Amino acid sequence: MTPMIRVGMSTCGLAAGAGAVYTAIDTYLHRRQLSVTLQPTGCVGACHREPLVEVVVDGASTLYGPVTPERVSLILDQHFGGRGRGVSPDWIVSRRADRTDYPFLGRQVKVTTPLCGVIDPHSLEDYLAYGGYQGFKQALKMTPEQVIQAIKDSHLRGRGGAGFPAGMKWDITRQQRGSDKYLICNADEGDPGAFMDRTMIEGDPHRLIEGMLIAAHAIGATRGYIYVRAEYPLAVKALRLALQQAREYGMVGQNILGSGMNFEFIIKEGAGAFVCGEETALMHSIEGKRGMPSMRPPYPSEHGLWGHPTNINNVETYASTPSILLNGPTWFASMGTPKSGGTKAFALTGAIQNSGLVEVPIGMTLREMIFDLGGGCKNNRAFKAVQLGGPSGGCIPASLLDTRIDYEDLKATGAIMGSGGMVVVDETTCMVDFARYFLSFTQDESCGKCVPCRIGTRKMLNLLTRISHGHATGADLERLLTLCETVRVGSLCGLGQTAPNPVLTTLRYFKDEYLAHIEEKRCPAGACEIDERQADNGRPLAHRAPAARAEAAL
């Protein structure tokens, strides 16, 4: 067996210096004239140890990281009979192929990302060697109704946010009249700290294509759009090459594999508007219009792209389907909870020791995720909260760490599963300022179409700024709560309807910090720039006479 060296060359690896490491390894192999396969791969998920290099000799795998060009010779000498000056144990991530000796990787269950960090994402041959497109071939042997029933039985729920049952959505689209039906993959990943879609596409683009082909067969769609952020150039490049290879292999175009099925793909690069993650705004963008949401109903399954029935799922949802058809819906359903089958991928970021992409069965607790896999907070600081669901999500405190990562359980806390962003904060974070950060994001990204979102989020942000600077009163806090409810109920789309979530959950679990800013004019975390001149005999500056305010300002 020819030895192999894999180098993680996704965005995270390249940002950490993987390009120089790859060149150093290539130079070493040429200098030693060694017959070794050097293979670029995607990210295995352990972004905190990038650049990552895996050396496989005689079937034995050793994963190293972080690797620098200076460490290359020392590491490779251990495997290829060099001087053998020794490798620091700190450089070794794992010595087992199943990674069970490294908890961050060993406790993961990979359904959508098993080949990320294993195959060359630019090689169709690699994907086929690991069973690629077998799920789609299995689907072609089944009727569309049988495929949809398998997805229903698997309890796969849409991984893009709300968790609507995927099989039910497919069925609704299938039943619509008309020959023109469309398929859309929402890869417009806009949450701060989220990188699930990017990692999956960069590391295994053919899995997404295969999943969409399965959905197209089930629904009767003839054209599919992949709406991907233009800020993901490596992902776009991988997709374009994969589609070209799939077409040459007979997986795209007319009469696919002699089945009579016709299907075409179109890549649409989004301009980075967060609101285009909302399905109606996304469709408007594809149609060449401004990305602004529309009232629902009608829903896209009935009246979608250019007025035709359209199914919209995200990358992870489509990427789950090949394994469901190959291994059976019961296998997939058994990994999750009774209402939610399978696994979920998360981007674990923030003040966490082990950051990266984590794929685990639905139902794992937050404590297991953050401490057993994530290693707890950096610098031995105390865990304070975790924000789930991005700007639309909510903050969950330490007292709720035993909450299961499940749609219903998370919703009960005031947070949401969302697409999978998970930002950890420690004791040095001010929760008022944290909520203000997310409000500033949603306010900037509001399309401005509806008044509650356009004006309400601005007023909410202004109030949060007043509170964080020590300028607010108790009346301002009441006004903030009223605004949250108005924006939540009155906004047109999910962006505005969920924008108050970070405020509402921080008020629910960390109200004492809000009161400290308002009543005591201090930030408990020491993170906010409180104007110490705001209090005069217990009265806020805003309540003083104009002359007194002017004097204090001097």
Image (cartoon, helix red, strand yellow):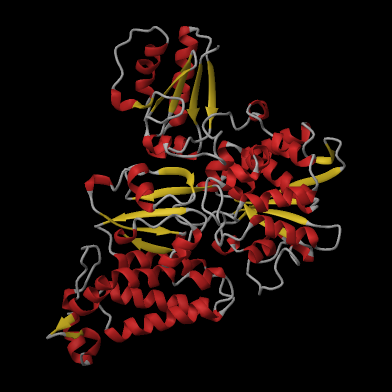
Residue 158 place in picture, x, y as percent: 60, 56
Would residue 234 be seen by someone viewing this image from the given angle? Answer: no
Residue at screen point 41% across, 36% down: 16
Classify residue 225 as left or right of residue 253: left
Q: Nearer the viewer, residue 166 or 235?
A: 166
Q: Nearer the viewer, residue 20 or 476?
A: 476
Classify residue 151 as left or right of residue 439: right
Would residue 258 be seen by someone viewing this image from the given angle? Answer: yes
Residue 347 place in picture, x, y as percent: 45, 48
Q: Residue furthest left?
A: 537
Residue at screen point 52% across, 39% down: 110
Q: Nearer the viewer, residue 9 or 355?
A: 355
Vertical relation: 358 (above or below) 283: above
Position of the C terminus, as image quadrant, is bottom left
Task: Tell me where residue 128 sits by quadrant.
Answer: top right
Residue at screen point 47% across, 44% down: 360
Residue 9 place in picture, x, y as percent: 50, 32
Residue at screen point 24% across, 78% down: 518
Vertical relation: 170 (above or below) 56: below
Classify residue 270 as left or right of residue 499: right
Q: Nearer the viewer, residue 535 or 144?
A: 144
In this rendering, the count of numbered labels is: 0
Residue 14 place in picture, x, y as percent: 46, 35
Position of the N terminus, as image quadrant, is top right
Task: Tell me where residue 426 sits by quadrant.
Answer: bottom left
Vertical relation: 421 (above or below) 447: above
